[in-house]
Image (cartoon, helix red, strand yellow):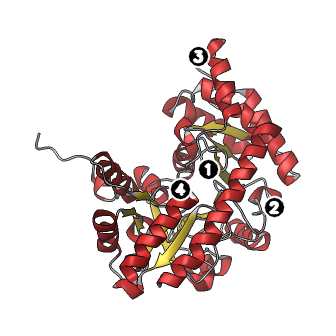
Amino acid sequence: MTRPYARRLQDIEPFRVVEVLTRAKQLAAAGRDIVRLEAGEPDFSTAEPIVRAAQAALARGETHYSQAAGIPELREAIANYYKTDYNLAIAPERIMITPGASGALLLISGLLLNPGDGILMTDPGYPCNRNFFRLVEGEGQLVPVGPQDRYQLTAEKAAAVWRENTVGAIVASPANPTGEILTEQELRDLYSLCERKDGYLIVDEIYHGLDYDEKAASILSITDQAFVINSFSKYFGMTGWRLGWLVAPPDAVPHLEKLAQNLFISMSTMGQYGALAAFEPETRGILNNRRDEFKRRRDYLLPELRRLGFDIPHTPAGALYLYAGIQKFGGNSAQFCVDMLEQHGISITPGADFGRYRANEHVRFAYTTSMSRLEEAVARMDRLFA
């Protein structure tokens, strides 16, 4: 076959953490002891009440298609979650269940972007965002951010780089890879800017619940005109179930449903019934204990990495990551990660996965493994960097 594939493939970059993950698994299968600090996947298995609920759904035959927007019971449960945890009244009709947060990103991309349109996003930031935008012939407009910005897109910075083809901005709070949050005032300012520019604001709230020192604010407390992405993967610990949700302005929901009908038909029905149990008091107690364990891991690994010479100028407020400068070790992120994995059995993610701005000087550590494994990683690095 000589005919080339679609041109967009040249612009859609690989998700490097998956490549690192694959190599780490290969080495482990060959008998190597690999400390896994690369993937943003909680190491805990899905909480037992969720598993039981899904098993019960299977046993009673809940194996057929659901509505494209999700089963009504789960949409109502999420609305109640916003009421109990945020004191917000969100109509269940504004909530759509999606196949992971990635499904929500695809729906938003299809809804908001015409060919040639752009959406502002932080650099560094979650890498798949710009690839979803490119898939629908739009573009992710990378905005360099650093410690002086707390690695976040501010309204002032967004206003300075807003282009003629910019139709909105996407932010994450807490953010991947930096763990930083946006305050309620910062969210308010960003929304005001987007409103003045006649643009959209998308807020990734996937790591809500994994906020350690202060509760992350939701854009939903400010406006019903923003788009919110969330997921059952992180705080709720359901990565392999591939369930997320999207909260949208009321007038956008029929268009999103039309897209979902065509793109997904529906999500896993038994998975949705399992997710209902995620909001039960027993499950929330389990999940909150796990959140406290993640905080304990952060509080151990952060000072240890700083002691070893990694540059981490801020304390991440949430998520599962430490975004670390490696200037002391030569500043070649890709090679540094290869050496750490192949020679020392420590698997971490290169900064190039998250953008371009000073990417070669950074790596990301995910504290998604046990304290004993974190201690083993630190011991290996002690021997290496001593």
Helix, strand or loop at label 4? It is loop
Residue type pointed to by label 2: Ile
Helix, strand or loop at label 1? It is loop
Helix, strand or loop at label 3? It is loop
Return the residue nearer the eye: 236 or 201: 236
- The answer to which image quadrant residue 76 occupies is top right
Looking at the rendered image, the quarter that the C terminus falls into is bottom left
Reading the image, the residue beneath label 1 is 234
State the separation of the CA atoms marked 2 and 1. 24 Å
Residue type pointed to by label 1: Lys
Which tag is nearer the camera, tag 3 or tag 1?
1
Reading the image, the residue beneath label 4 is 369
Disc 2: CA contacts within 10 A as few (<14), some (14-19) or many (>=20):
some
Reading the image, the residue beneath label 3 is 64
> Horizontal and vertical percent for residue 214?
78, 67
Residue type pointed to by label 4: Thr
Instruction: Examine the rendered structure and indicate whether residue 73 appears above or below residue 142.
Output: above
- Left or right: where 323 falls relative to 3: right
Can the viewer see residue 27? yes
Looking at the rendered image, the quarter that the N terminus falls into is top left
